[in-house]
Image (cartoon, rainbow, N blue to C red):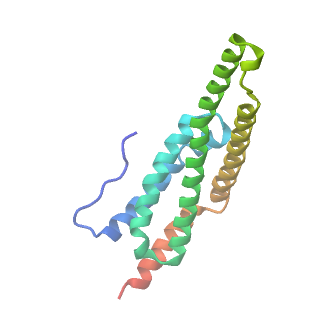
Amino acid sequence: MARRWKTKPKKSLRENAQEIIPLLFDEFMETKVRVVGHPRLKDELHGMRLKGKMLRYIMEIAGGFYGPAFGECYEEIRRAVGLMGSIHDCDVQLPVIQQHVRELRAFNAAVKSDDRIPTAPMVVLHHQHKERRNTLFNELCGILLRWEAENFRGRILLSMTRATELSQP
């Protein structure tokens, strides 16, 4: 998707950030319904994460302009994007573990019983990663749904607006 925002060279970094952050938040959240409703859509979750990283980085850069309320919003974004990264790690590791189990089973089928390698530890590891992914995913969904219910976007805007008003002479 093409970016819906552009920086304006004649405006300050603070002014640009104030315009860009809400648009980045909208881009970040545009796939929320699909992600929350379909836990197996790994590519959509990963795409959402990448958009969230851009938002997080811009918020981090602009953090000094807007004060503690904005900092709290930034921390929530940072936490959600971090959860998405941990979920992505599980999504990458699960197929690798599963493939390793298949290879061990094929090896075990081809050798004498004394030479077999136990697969149970890898099966347990796979199960633990699936459980971790589910736990992290449920936590992420809770955050995204809470943001919607509490108008988190509005909170971000308000934190920027109030800080800007307070800094005006």
Toward the bottom, the furthest residue is 169
Q: Which residue is drawn at 56% across and 36% down?
A: 92
Q: Is residue 63 left or right of residue 129?
A: left
Vertical position of residue 38 compared to residue 155: above or below = above
Q: Position of residue 165 (x, y in %)?
A: 43, 81
Toward the left, the furthest residue is 10
User: 126 or 1, which is in the foreground?
Assistant: 126
User: 143 or 27, which is in the foreground?
Assistant: 143
Q: In this view, does 63 lie to the left or right of 113?
A: left
Q: Which residue is drawn at 65% across and 51% down?
A: 140
Q: Which residue is drawn at 58% across and 55% down?
A: 80
Toward the top, the furthest residue is 110
Q: Where is residue 113 in the image (x, y as percent from the top left)?
A: 77, 16
Q: Quadrant of the C terminus?
A: bottom left
Q: Where is residue 65 in the image (x, y as percent from the top left)?
A: 40, 75
Vertical position of residue 74 compared to residue 47: above or below = below
Which image quarter: residue 10?
A: bottom left
User: 27 or 74, which is in the foreground?
Assistant: 74
Q: Where is residue 81 in the image (x, y as percent from the top left)?
A: 54, 53
Vertical position of residue 68 compared to residue 79: above or below = below
Q: Is residue 134 left or right of residue 26?
A: right
Q: In this view, does 115 lie to the left or right of 1?
A: right
Q: Residue at x 67, y 39 (%)?
A: 37
Q: In which quarter of the image is the N terminus?
A: top left
